[in-house]
Structures are given as structure tokens and as C-alpha cells.
């Protein structure tokens, strides 16, 4: 989208200079506002035209039956789908009795700006009605990052060519009509009219609706209050019915005058509280927002974001697109998580209903790593959500005949709701992602209370799963068979290498944490015999390797499978899952997304430099990137193995996944993990950042920075062990500055240095020898980037 002439490249905002109806669905996603609790898609203020109306509350869903042609033991019985709740954004406008609908009359100008520093969406439109009356509309929309349940809209209308009779209809609307599915399995299952009315209210300038869901039995409430400023003729009235509560404002407005409405909205829900309690909950939130006022909300929003950007900003010189994209990404990551507060972070955030609003392993593997080093305060609540779902995960493991916990492949509440059993049953690597995220958080923050409490619980129960899932063969090697790894074009495999290495880390970490906290370990029933079993399994874990090819195997026997016919696969047949049966994909060497390459990224200590180079080249030729999760990991390993130009191309793909709608499904919501991948590709790729344990690092954080020739400077900050470290990388030197905290030992390309507030460290960046780039499957080479733009067409293989 950003390459469209209507979208400007600017460092601190996303600006749309014209309204383009064919890409309205995508723009509704990219202009979404959220705070982790409330999500408002970037629909136009007047409600129509729209592509996918969307207002979401984190955790609010409805249950639906999962269809099975032939059900089997252990299959989930019901699915969960995030639903569109009461819409509080709508402010309809009538000009001399004609609805303001931008599809009619003449649109003389339209601009929207998503401001990453102010945290608001601004809009300006000039419209002439079919009868010839012209008006200017300006609005500013905000979902508060400081007041969890609050959002607000400032809406202004000014006549331009004569007096106008204006009518504003500020509404709360439930059960909006939604578009039907287009058959893409990544989309949500639409549920018509999911909300049952319980209460409607309208009095003075205040509105309220309360509904509940039928099967999930959740109570949802929305309330609104208003400030009205207009000529003396301005009057208003309120009315309500079960699915609509409306304030109608009328005024005769002359040129030079304006009609202004400030709308405060509060939204909340509960699965347990009574109707009066939920009613009072949103009324109280509304009173808090109203008391601080519009200017107060703006001021607090800016202060919150100033603090965030002081820790999280990434500066990129040499590519304005990437500079804009990484700030866009970080802004949306914050919006997805800031006030989630022990709720799941969905794969699409709260920007759309793609994947039914489910949370996947993406969050622990891609999103939480970024937040751990930029906004650690929001990471512990996300992990506590996983901890709260331990009872469901333990029940699932028991159902599967296993010990410990089996976390779900996709979920909202903690119960597995994937009808596709090779993922919903066999993708046990979700456990490893949860354990890895807990380990990373504790290592980066030193939060001993978390480690002793939820952290130890998570490590112990995931370790028990691995020990009961795997087995020792007659020679003592520990195997984990019948699993589906990150690559979804392989399933139910033997010894998936990523799974095995992550399980190995999990087993060792659980044993070590049990030693550090023996009293808590005893409470969990952990004894010396069990920890010895964990260590033994980890020490003897199977690591598939093909001696003839000199490469590791994604899973045992993978390199002996038949090669996919890449030469015979036309470009319009991607993604393969939409055009070929899984049976065919599973028995061929073809990789949907980074799997073994991801293992090298997160368990770099398990591979030598030569092994990484050979592995990367081999799997590059097989990886088709039909998943948005792949490009960032390929960027990191391309950079580490010396292919900086290729890494730069993959950075562009991860960064522009939604801004250029590369997967053709941004309409359903943003790819939150790919947005996180922008930071990962820059900081872990070109910054070369690795946490302790990722490499042969002696237990301290390390950096091995190198920039591609297209970038002249990269600067970022990370929060590590209570310190804030700033890293600035040029084409030949790297500078490390401790902004806050006690001196910190780090590695620079393997050399240990100590950074203090009084003594920044500058080191040379060693040059790379020229290396031949590996090949990709026909038609799947990432677009080359030159001068900050992607070159159209495929580069030669």
C-alpha cells in the first residue's frame, strides 16, 4: 500500500492523501487504533462506506461448532471466534438532509494521518453533496493507552459555500452487518448477530448498551457521553432501542461557524459480573475519561508514547521506507499489547478478525522478544495469561495421554480450538515457545518473583511434557516423534530439529530453575530423580544430520524426500496451501516458513559457523515463504552468514508485509508477528544482537553488527537487566552507550567489553569477504531493494 501514490513516506506518521475505495479494507487495518483491550478498525467516522466494520474487546468471542467429516479422539469440540462488539466510533452526518456518503456527491479532498508520536488518527475531508452544499470535516480519534477502557473522537463540521442545516447522529451500534467469507482459510468464520440485547439507555448526552453472547455467556457494555459546541440554534435529543443508542444534534451553521462534537466512549466486558456491575463498570470508565477531558487524554497519550519511544525507537538512515515501517511496526505492537493485561495477544492484534482473533505461538516467538527489550512491563502480563491457562493445557496433555501441559496451537481462552489435528494436536513446539519467552523475560529483566512463581510453573509443566512425549532408543538417544514443527508444509515428523533443540533448552532450564527454587519445586512435586531425567533427555536429544550433504535435517529423513517441482510451479500457485493438497506438500522437500533456519537463529549455540552457512544455503533453495513469519528469520540468518544484500531484501519484505499488502490479506487485520519481525531483522539481523545462550557467549549479551551497503546508520536502544543500552552502527564502527544503569558487560563480535554511563565504547566492524548468495525457489526470490525502494520484478536466480 505504501507504494501507492496516495501514501507518503514520512518518518513519524502514515499519511493517506486521497481516499481509494478499492483498498479501503487494507486501510481500515493499517489505520486501526487499539490499546490491547479495545480495538477500533480505521473505519470512516460516518460508518459508510466500509469494508469490514470492526470494534473488538480483547477476549470477547463466541463459540461455534467445529465441522468434522470424521471426528477422532482428542479433537476439539468447539471453536472460538472473536466477534465485532458494539461500535462506538460512528458519527453520521447529514448536510441539508443528505447523508454524507463519500461514494456520492464530490469528494474534493481527503487525508488521514496515523501519528505514531501522538497516538491518534487525524482526518480531514472536503465534500460536496449531490445538491451542491460543501462542508469541511475534521476529526481526531484516540484509543487511550493510559485509560484502559476509554476512547474518544473529536468531530468538527464547517460549511464552505453557504449556510447548512447539519445533523450529527452519534451512535452506539450492535450487531452490524458483516461481509461474508471469501473462502480463504485464514479468514474468520463470520457469526451473524452474536449479541443478545440486555439493556439500552439514552438520556441527555449519555448513551449506553449492554449485550451478552449466547454460548460463551459474556456480557459486553458500551457507554458514551458528549460535549457539544455550536451556534445558538444547536439542539440535541437522545433515543435508544435494543441494538442502537443515538444522540442526534441539529444546528443551522453559517460559513465561518462550525459544529463540534467531542465523543467519549467506554467499553468493557465480563464473563462473570452481573448486568448492573458491567453497566457500572463502563459508566465509571466513562466518568474518568470525561473528567480528564479531551485535552487531558491527548496529553497523557503523548506522554505515554514519549516514554515508549525513548526506549524503543529505531533510527534507520539510508532507507526512508524502512524508517517509517519500523516505527509503524513498533506503534502497532504497543497497541496490541499495552493494556492486554493478562489476556491473549491475537495474531492480528485488535485490527481485524483474521484467524478468528486467535493467539498462536507467534506471540511468544516473535512479539514478546521485541517487547522484552523495549516495553518489558507488558511482557509479564502476557506470560501470566499463559500461566492462567495452565489448567486447560494440563487437561489437554492428560487427554493426549501425556504428563505436564500441552499449550494450544490456536486459542482465545486457553482451550485448543484448531480443527486441523496435525497442528492442533502435534504442534507441541508451542510449549517450547512459551518456555523460551519466560526464559528470555527473566534473563533480560532479572524478575526473580516471576521466575519463582509463574516462570517455574511454566518451565516445569512444559519440561514434563517433553519427557513424557519423547523416548530413549536402545542406544540411549532421546527422540521426540510424531510432531509438527514451525514449517506447516511438514507434519507429524520424527525429531523435528527446531522442536528438539527448543525442548532441550526447556529441559535444562527447568532443571536449573528447580535447583534455584527448591521449596517451590517441591511444591510442584519435582524431585532429584525427575530433574536428572530432564538433564539426561536434554544431553541425549536427537539432532538429525545428513553426513553426505553436510547439512542438518529439518526432521529425521527430510533430506531424503522428493524435491518439490519448483520449476513447474507457476507464480500464481502460491501460497501452495490454497492450490495443492497437504498430502502432496507433506511428502516433498518444500518449506513454508523458516524452521531449521529459525532453530539456528534462536539456538545458535547448537551450530558452528560453517554449519550455519551450509544449512542456510540448503534451506534457502526450499523455502517459499508462504507465511509472513518467515522473512524476518531469513533476514537474521542471511545477515549472520554474510549475505547482507539478501538480508536487506528480507527486511523489506517483513517490514512492508502490511503496508504493501504482500500476503493479500491485510484486509483481515495486520500481521503482528511480521511487524515484530521488522525490529528483529534490524536489531538481531544487522545489529547482531543475541541474548545469553543464543551463541557461544559466556552468558552475556552480544552484538555482531554489520550494515548492508544501502544503510548508512542504524541506531536502537534495548532495555537489559534494568539498564538502557544504546547501540549506534555505521558502515565501519559501532558505538555502545549506557544511557541508564550500572556498567554492563557485552560482546562485540566476540570481544568482551564493559560499557558504563561515563565510558561509551566504540569498536570497528570487521569487514566481510565477498560471498556467493544462495539460490531461492523459482519465483520466490525476495524483491531487491535499492535506494529505499523495492525493485519490481524478480532478481535473477
Image (spheres, grey):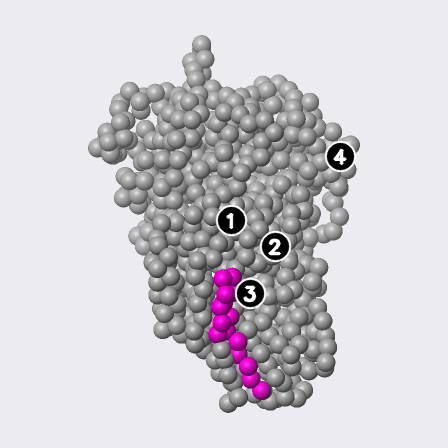
Please give the name of the residue rendered at 27% of the width and 30% of the height, measured from the top-left corner. 524
Judged from the image, the secondary structure of the residue bearing numbered disc 3 is strand
**Looking at the image, is mark 1 or mark 3 earlier in the sequence?**
1
Mark sitting on residue 82: 1
Furthest toward the left, the residue is 519
Q: Is residue 146 magenta?
A: no
- From the image, which quarter does the N terminus lie in? bottom right
- On the image, numbered disc 4 is attached to which residue? 569
Residue 23 appears in the rendering? yes
Mark sitting on residue 114: 3
Relative placement, left or right, of 628 versus 118 is right
Judged from the image, the secondary structure of the residue bearing numbered disc 2 is loop
- Please provide the residue range marked out in magenta: 238-252
User: Marks 4 and 3, Cα distance to the nearest angstrom?
Assistant: 40 Å
Judged from the image, the secondary structure of the residue bearing numbered disc 1 is strand
User: Marks 4 and 1, Cα distance to the nearest angstrom?
Assistant: 36 Å
Please give the name of the residue rendered at 72% of the width and 80% of the height, measured from the top-left corner. 131
Q: Nearer the viewer, mark 2 or mark 4?
A: 2
Residue 648 position, x and y percent, is 61, 48
State yes or no: discs 2 and 1 in contact (Cβ < 8 Å). no
**Looking at the image, is mark 2 or mark 4 earlier in the sequence?**
2
Badge 3: few (under 14), some or many (20 or more) residues near its Cα, within 10 Å? many
Residue 188 position, x and y percent, is 58, 46
Mark sitting on residue 178: 2
Residue 526 position, x and y percent, is 28, 26
Residue 450 position, x and y percent, is 30, 43
Amino acid at each position: 500500500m505504501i507504494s501507492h501514490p496516495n501514501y507518503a513516506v514520512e518518518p513519524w506518521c502514515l499519511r493517506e492523501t486521497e481516499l481509494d475505495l478499492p483498498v479501503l479494507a487494507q486501510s481500515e487495518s493499517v489505520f486501526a487504533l487499539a490499546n490491547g483491550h479495545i480495538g477500533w478498525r480505521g473505519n470512516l467516522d460516518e460508518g459508510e462506506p466500509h469494508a469490514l466494520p470492526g470494534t473488538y474487546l480483547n477476549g470477547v468471542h463466541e463459540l461455534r461448532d467445529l465441522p468434522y467429516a470424521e471426528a477422532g479422539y482428542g479433537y476439539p469440540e468447539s471453536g472460538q471466534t472473536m466477534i465485532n462488539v458494539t461500535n462506538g466510533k460512528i458519527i453520521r452526518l447529514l448536510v441539508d438532509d443528505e447523508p454524507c456518503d463519500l461514494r456520492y456527491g464530490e469528494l474534493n479532498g481527503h487525508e488521514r494521518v496515523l501519528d505514531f508520536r501522538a497516538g491518534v488518527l487525524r482526518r480531514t475531508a472536503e465534500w460536496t453533496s449531490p445538491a451542491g452544499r460543501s462542508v469541511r470535516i475534521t476529526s481526531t480519534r484516540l484509543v487511550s493507552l493510559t485509560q484502559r477502557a476509554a476512547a474518544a473522537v473529536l468531530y468538527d463540521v464547517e460549511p464552505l459555500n453557504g449556510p447548512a442545516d447539519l445533523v450529527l447522529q452519534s451512535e452506539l451500534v450492535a450487531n452490524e452487518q458483516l461481509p461474508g467469507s471469501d473462502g480463504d482459510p485464514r479468514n474468520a468464520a463470520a457469526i451473524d448477530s452474536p449479541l443478545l440485547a440486555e439493556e439500552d439507555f439514552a438520556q441527555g448526552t449519555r448513551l449506553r448498551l449492554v449485550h451478552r453472547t449466547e454460548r460463551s455467556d459474556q456480557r459486553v457494555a458500551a457507554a458514551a457521553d458528549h460535549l457539544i459546541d455550536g451556534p445558538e440554534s444547536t439542539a440535541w435529543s437522545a433515543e435508544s432501542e435494543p441494538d442502537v443508542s443515538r444522540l442526534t444534534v441539529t444546528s443551522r451553521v453559517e460559513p465561518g461557524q462550525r459544529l463540534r462534537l467531542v465523543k467519549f466512549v467506554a467499553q468493557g466486558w465480563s464473563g462473570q459480573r452481573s448486568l448492573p456491575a458491567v453497566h457500572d463498570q463502563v459508566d465509571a470508565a466513562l466518568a474518568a475519561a470525561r473528567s480528564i477531558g479531551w485535552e487531558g487524554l491527548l496529553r497523557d497519550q503523548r506522554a505515554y508514547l514519549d516514554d515508549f519511544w525513548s526506549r524503543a525507537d529505531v533510527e534507520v538512515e539510508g532507507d526512508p521506507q524502512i524508517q517509517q515501517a519500523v516505527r509503524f511496526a513498533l506503534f502497532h505492537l504497543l497497541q496490541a499489547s499495552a493494556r492486554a493485561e493478562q489476556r491473549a495477544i491475537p495474531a492480528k492484534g485488535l485490527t481485524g478478525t483474521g484467524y478468528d482473533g486467535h493467539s498462536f505461538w507467534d506471540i511468544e516467538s516473535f512479539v514478546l522478544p521485541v517487547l522484552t527489550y523495549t516495553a518489558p512491563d507488558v511482557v509479564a502480563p502476557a506470560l501470566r495469561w499463559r500461566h492462567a491457562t495452565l489448567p486447560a493445557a494440563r487437561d489437554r496433555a492428560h487427554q493426549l495421554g501425556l504428563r505436564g501441559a500441552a499449550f494450544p496451537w490456536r486459542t482465545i481462552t486457553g482451550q485448543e480450538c484448531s480443527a486441523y489435528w496435525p497442528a492442533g494436536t502435534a504442534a507441541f513446539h508451542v510449549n517450547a515457545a512459551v518456555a523460551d519467552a519466560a526464559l528470555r523475560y527473566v534473563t533480560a529483566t532479572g524478575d526473580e518473583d516471576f521466575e519463582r512463581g509463574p516462570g517455574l510453573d511454566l518451565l516445569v509443566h512444559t519440561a514434563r511434557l517433553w519427557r513424557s512425549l519423547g523416548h530413549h532408543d536402545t542406544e540411549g538417544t532421546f527422540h521426540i516423534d510424531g510432531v509438527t514443527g514451525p514449517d506447516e508444509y511438514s507434519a507429524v515428523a520424527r525429531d523435528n530439529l527446531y522442536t528438539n533443540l527448543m525442548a532441550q533448552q526447556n529441559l535444562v532450564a527447568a532443571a536449573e530453575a528447580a535447583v534455584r527454587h527448591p521449596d517451590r519445586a517441591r511444591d510442584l512435586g519435582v524431585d532429584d530423580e525427575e530433574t536428572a531425567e530432564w538433564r539426561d533427555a536434554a544431553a541425549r536429544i536427537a539432532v538429525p544430520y545428513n553426513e553426505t550433504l553436510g547439512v542438518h535435517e529439518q526432521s529425521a529423513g527430510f533430506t531424503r524426500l522428493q524435491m518439490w517441482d519448483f520449476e513447474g510451479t507457476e507464480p500464481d500457485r502460491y501460497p501452495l496451501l490454497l492450490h495443492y493438497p497437504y498430502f502432496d506438500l507433506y511428502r516433498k522437500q518444500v518449506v513454508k516458513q523458516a524452521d531449521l533456519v529459525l532453530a539456528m537463529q534462536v539456538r545458535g549455540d547448537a551450530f558452528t559457523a560453517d554449519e550455519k552457512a551450509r544449512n542456510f544455503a540448503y534451506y534457502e533453495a526450499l523455502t517459499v515463504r508462504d507465511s509472513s513469519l518467515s522473512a524476518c528469520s531469513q533476514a537474521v540468518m542471511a545477515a549472520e552468514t554474510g549475505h547482507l544484500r539478501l538480508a536487506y531484501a528480507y527486511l523489506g519484505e517483513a517490514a512492508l508485509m502490511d503496508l504493501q499488502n504482500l500476503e493479500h490479506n491485510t484486509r483481515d487485520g495486520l500481521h503482528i508477528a511480521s511487524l515484530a519481525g521488522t525490529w528483529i531483522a534490524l536489531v538481531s539481523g544487522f545489529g547482531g544482537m543475541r541474548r545469553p545462550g543464543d551463541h557461544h557467549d559466556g552468558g552475556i549479551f552480544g552484538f555482531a553488527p554489520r550494515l548492508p551497503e544501502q544503510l548508512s546508520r542504524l541506531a536502537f536502544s534495548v532495555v537489559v537487566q534494568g539498564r538502557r543500552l544504546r547501540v549506534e552502527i555505521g558502515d565501519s564502527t559501532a558505538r555502545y552507550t549506557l544511557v541508564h544503569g550500572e556498567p554492563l558487560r557485552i560482546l562485540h563480535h566476540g570481544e568482551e567489553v564493559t560499557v558504563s554511563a561515563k565510558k561509551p565504547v566504540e569498536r570497528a566492524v570487521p569487514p566481510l569477504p565477498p560471498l556467493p548468495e544462495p539460490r531461492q525457489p523459482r519465483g520466490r526470490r525476495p524483491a531487491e531493494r535499492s535506494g529505499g525502494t523495492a525493485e519490481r520484478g524478480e532478481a535473477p536466480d
